[in-house]
Image (cartoon, helix red, strand yellow):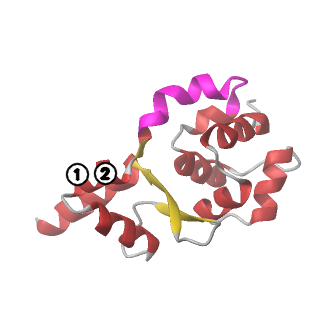
Amino acid sequence: MMTFNYKALKTLIDEKGIKASQLADMTAIPRNTVGYYLKGETTPKADRITQIAEALGVSAETFFTDNAAELAAPFQKLLLTVAEAAKMMGCSEQRIRQGIINDNWNPSIGSAIREKGPREKYQFHIPLRRVQSYLLILDEMEV
């Protein structure tokens, strides 16, 4: 039986410069629960592992290995920049940013984490899979 490697989760969020509170916001998992996962006090259920993996742009298998950074490397391109998402969707970067901030995309294509400070500055997480799903739904609606 494979065991959830909480150290792999910690390594990934450290490498990506994401705080536990940001991961909680990105996944809608309570902050204290994310904290328990990071300390190894609680093991997430399969659906939560999937949510976390998608938010971080990695495969769920990443959390069942000792070398998370190495396993995550091939999946790094699973997260898009705002420019890449705009190009795929045929719209402006501003529309992508505002749509994510205001939660206008249905289904959601990503998340925005507001950085602390006097200016409104956001860090965007846009999984390639979500953009592809959104575009597929649009194609099906046009048929």
Which amino acid does the dot numbered 1 rest on?
Lys
Task: Where is residue 15? Give x, y as percent.
Answer: 64, 37
Quarter placement of the N terminus: top right
In this picture, residue 87 sits left or right of residue 17: left
Compared to residue 12, the image places residue 127 above or below, namely: below
Q: Which residue is mark 1?
A: 87
Residue extent of the magenta highlight? 64-77
Residue visible at 37% across and 72% down? 98
Task: Where is residue 39? Give x, y as percent.
Answer: 86, 46
Secondary-structure class at tag 1: helix
Residue visible at 48% across and 33% down? 75
Q: Is residue 60 visible?
A: yes
Compared to residue 89, the image places residue 120 above or below, namely: below
Task: Where is residue 115? Give x, y as percent.
Answer: 60, 63
Q: Which residue is mark 2?
A: 83
The question of residue 6 being in magenta is answered with: no
Task: Where is residue 125? Give x, y as percent.
Answer: 48, 54
Compared to residue 20, the image places residue 120 above or below, namely: below
In this picture, residue 6 sits left or right of residue 25: right
Label of residue 136 in the image: none
How far apart are the two marked residues, 2 and 1, measured between alpha carbons? 6 Å
Tell me the crowding category of disc 2: few under 14, some 14 to 19, or many 20 or more residues within 10 angstroms, Cα based.
some
Q: Is residue 106 visible?
A: no
